[in-house]
Image (cartoon, coloured by chain):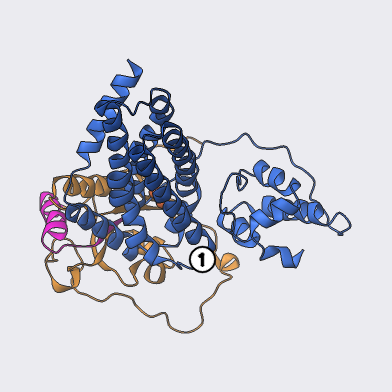
Chain colours: A blue, B orange
Amino acid sequence: MKPYLTKGIKEIIDQFPEVEKILNEYDIGCGPCNVGLCQLKDIVEIHRLPVDQEQELMARITKAIDPEAEVKIPEAKEAPPPEPKAFNYSPPMRKLVDEHVLIKRWIALIPEVVKDLEVESQAGRQLVLDGVDMIRSYADKFHHAKEEDILFKYFDENSDILKVMHEDHKQARGHVQAILEALEIKDKNAIAEHLMAYAGLLTEHIRKEDEILYPWMDSSLSTRQVGELFSKFNEADLQMGFSPKKYEAFIDSLEKKLNA
Amino acid sequence: MQIQGCPGSRMMSFENKDAKDSGRVVGKIQSQLKQWPIQMHLISPTAPYYQNADVLLTADCVAYALGDFHRDYLKDKSIAIACPKLDQGQEMYLEKIKAWIDDAMINTLTILIMQVPCCMGLLNLAQQAAQTAERKIPLKFVVVGVQGDILQEEWV
Ligand SMILES: [Fe+2]
Ligand SMILES: [Fe+2]
């Protein structure tokens, strides 16, 4: 079992698909992650399961990897009813979680935008450009920049989990670039494909941050660091040179238009 | 037996804690206090040790109840103490908390109170001051049980 503790989870799941099912039962959804280079031991640690559940999980994974292994799987206890997850985020983390809300509202509109996609008229092309501006300015410049330039600097940037986060941001930028190139040649299918891929990527990325990464970061930040992050985030917003209100207005009006 | 009267001043006695004291520290415990004065009426909110500091606003009783107060909470922080139940002239406190935030530019404010209901007044006071201040800072509160246990520790 030991060598598997330091293996990337994707590699383990590819070899032993059962492991994905087991992780799912403990609310550890590594399956859809498109990077999957987090090590098994880190994944177990970062989810901070109660001790008995962690032991049970590890025993079951060991069994799935090596059916011959001698492991005692603790008696399955009656599963407690799942509690709704409510995190007491520190104020700077709460700010990032709140920013995700507008990005999620945009993601929710993408399937509708794709359905009515139209590149022959100026208005149709403008909608794509506005969507790209929303992603580039709000999601990337306003939001991801606070993560990459400030928050992540407080942690080991070579850790697997942060490499995954950086990689997600990079892939999102790749989709935006592809959307613009496709718009140039009026390739509707490619625009639709990359918009949908962006939506899928960011949905999963935001879930990872809200439910796993931020609570874990909060648990290891000192009070001093929380205060510093809070003022650095505010400072960064002031330096940004545009108001996020513009993008709230864009989403408001697009929601009205598409839900009308 | 029905208990009557104010829970803030109800009499209680606790079991001998010796048996529980497993993590005994050997030698003298170092004080983490790095300033004087500390009483809210006596402090100047813009004193050098409040500038950009992580500040504790602590109800008077907390440091007596909390066994590891110096090591776990006071270390690296600046402090002021007050009693929201008995102190006179608390409008002054409101102004001083605002001055911490706006003039001394403190980094964070942590309010430590006892579990008794009258202690909530200190948290309310701090929240009120924070709302009227121009700068925004992270605010945390910690509720301490009368036997020194941490009952709640949350960002506001
Ligand atoms: Fe991110
Ligand atoms: Fe994010």
Q: Residue at coordinates 34% horizontally, 48% vertically from top-left?
A: A96
Dividing the image into 4 quarters, which one contains the N terminus of chain A? bottom right
Local crowd size for mark 1, using a 10 Å CA cut-off: few (<14), some (14–19), many (≥20): few
Q: Check if residue B35 falls in the magenta segment.
A: no
Q: Is A155 situated left or right of A98 in this image?
A: right
Split into 4 quadrants, where in the image is the C terminus of chain A?
Answer: top left
A196 shown above or below B136: above
> For residue B81, which quarter of the picture?
bottom left
Residue placed furthest toward the top: A260
Residue B10 appears at what percent x and percent y?
Answer: 39, 46
Label 1: state its secondary structure. loop
Q: Which residue is mark 1?
A: A159
Count numbered badges in the picture.
Answer: 1
Identify which residue is drawn at 51% across, 78% down: B25
Type of residue at label 1?
A: Ser
- Residue A238: percent from left, percent from top: 17, 53
Magenta-colored span: B88-111
Q: Is residue A125 above or below residue B134?
A: above
Magenta segment: does it hold B108? yes
Q: In this orientation, which residue lies closer to the viewer: B21 or B105?
A: B105
Residue A82 appears in view: yes
The percent coordinates of residue A174 (x first, y second) are 42, 50
